[in-house]
Image (spheres, rainbow, N blue to C red):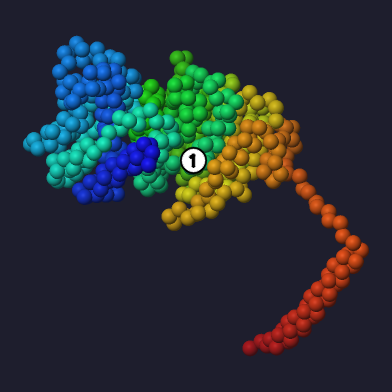
Amino acid sequence: MTTTQQFSQQTKSLIDDLKSVCANYGLGNDGNEFKIITQVFLYKFLNDKFVHEIKQLDEGIAKAESWEAALKALSQDDYEMLILQLSESTAVISPDHFITSLFNKQHEANFADIFDTTLTDIARDNSDIFSVLTDGGEKIVLFENLSKYVTDKRDEFCKAIINKLTGFSFEHIFHEKFDFYATIFEYLIKDYNTNSGGKYAEYFTPHAVSKVMARCLVPNSQKGKIDNVTCYDPSAGSGSLLMNLAHEIGEDKCTIYSQDISQKSSGLLRLNLILNDLVHSIHNIIKGNTILDPYHKQANGELETFDYIVSNPPFKLDFSDFSADLDSKANHERFFAGIPKVPAKKKESMAIYLMFLQHIIYSLKANGKAAIVVPTGFITAQSGIDKKIRQKLVDEKMLAGVVSMPSNIFANTGTNVSILFIDKTNQADVVLIDASNLGKKVKDGKNQKTLLSHAEENKIISTFNNRDVVDDLSVVVSYEDIKAKNYSLSAGQYFEVKIEYVDITQNEFEEKLGNFNTNLSDLFDQSRVIEKEIKQQLGNLKYD
């Protein structure tokens, strides 16, 4: 077993152990379980990263029989100098707050209070860098008092937690890359990222969709050439789209911005940023309502614009409470195609994604690019706001292409989806791909899901980036072609109808014609029999 596989297995075992502790104390499937699991995991991760960096900076501490004793033996000045050399992505943790220190204190009275105070002190000491902001300016810090979620035996609960954190260290995996942490993150939140969260549920965008979006926005030809760019998601969820995009660009070459109405999502996104060495972007993570009150603005009060935008906006959300507030002069340019009406009998309508789509177009820089998940019905709608948006994309030449994905690519929704690619610099042709026939159907719990193979994912990506024309898969069309098709963005409407001719001999032709005559005669005979039976049955009908 490789080192990465070993640590992956150990990490997943730790997550399972923490869930087991929660279950043993009555918190299994409780609404607060995910807070405990994710925050304890984060405490473990930050503790081990701090120790790792300290050892990298001080060879004496690294080689000491007891690194903790060697660290505590430093003078105050030497200790502060060491702390100043830590990277920005490393939380500062005092010796009294180490996992080893907590472990040694577990037999003291009121251990739950000691445990809670340790976490809240770390959160306070690192508030400036690691806090998520609300749109009202409030800080959501790293940790809270976790023992409050246990009704009794708080000390025993916290002891059980701390004993699960000492089995192994993350120290040897901090140089691993995105794929490792993506796997760990998905495993960590897999039970908390479902539609059980209600109307503001977070959906983990499938890897195939995230990969296609990121690699079509940043093709191999541009890798290494992009620097100092901004990446934005106005409905970020747990951040899988942003993480994939940052990985393609380079985590040190981009800055992440996001907004999401869910506090749960914002917390998970913060965790994702920490795992993926994007701590420098945490202060740009905002908990708030993007459509009603977008947070990210320029010094002059205008909305901020971005180099790259990725989004899987909500398809169903009741925004009737604030829809009237959106119809203002200030919003007319942002919502250029109009504000959809919320159906009175079905308020959680799909209209909300049209608001996000317009917001994204408005938030792109003059040379910006975007990839957005939309219902496939959007690409062919013949009227309304959908068509007005498509007309703007085509008439103003800012469309890169569309990829229509297979049905059930999302296991938790039956809505067919497409990926809409926007590129404000694309003055030439547009790539339309119909990937609906790709993939393999599998069962995912009670639902059916379509999985794309790596080869199929790469085929979609290379076809898009190379602008290849592939029979029954892709077409490359001009903006004028799209206008002629009433602004349809469905690849299938542009496929050529092909008639195949097969050469046959005169004898083969006469044999086929004879077979057709024989079959037709048999059908006529059967028809006469049926006709006779129907007339007979009608003749037997009597009025009583």
Give left or right: position of 387 versus 289: right
Q: Quadrant of the N terminus?
A: top left
Q: Residue at x 61, y 40 (%)?
A: 459
Give the image location of residue 7, x and y in percent. 34, 38
Residue nearest the observer in this picture, 251 or 388: 251
Q: Is residue 250 above or below residue 371?
A: above
Give the image location of residue 543, x and y in percent. 66, 87
Could you tell me the amino acid type at mark 1?
Answer: His
Give the image location of residue 449, x and y in percent. 50, 51
Element on which disc 1 rests: helix
Q: Quadrant of residue 494?
A: top right
The residue furthest left is 109
Q: Quadrant of residue 203?
A: top left
Residue nearest the observer in this picture, 226 or 124: 226
Q: Is residue 54 above or below residue 264?
A: above
Give left or right: position of 410 versus 281: right
**Residue 537 visible (yes or no):** yes
Give the image location of residue 208, x and y in percent. 52, 41
**Residue 352 visible (yes or no):** no
Q: Residue at x 23, y 46 (%)?
A: 21
The residue under label 1 is 207
The residue furthest right is 506
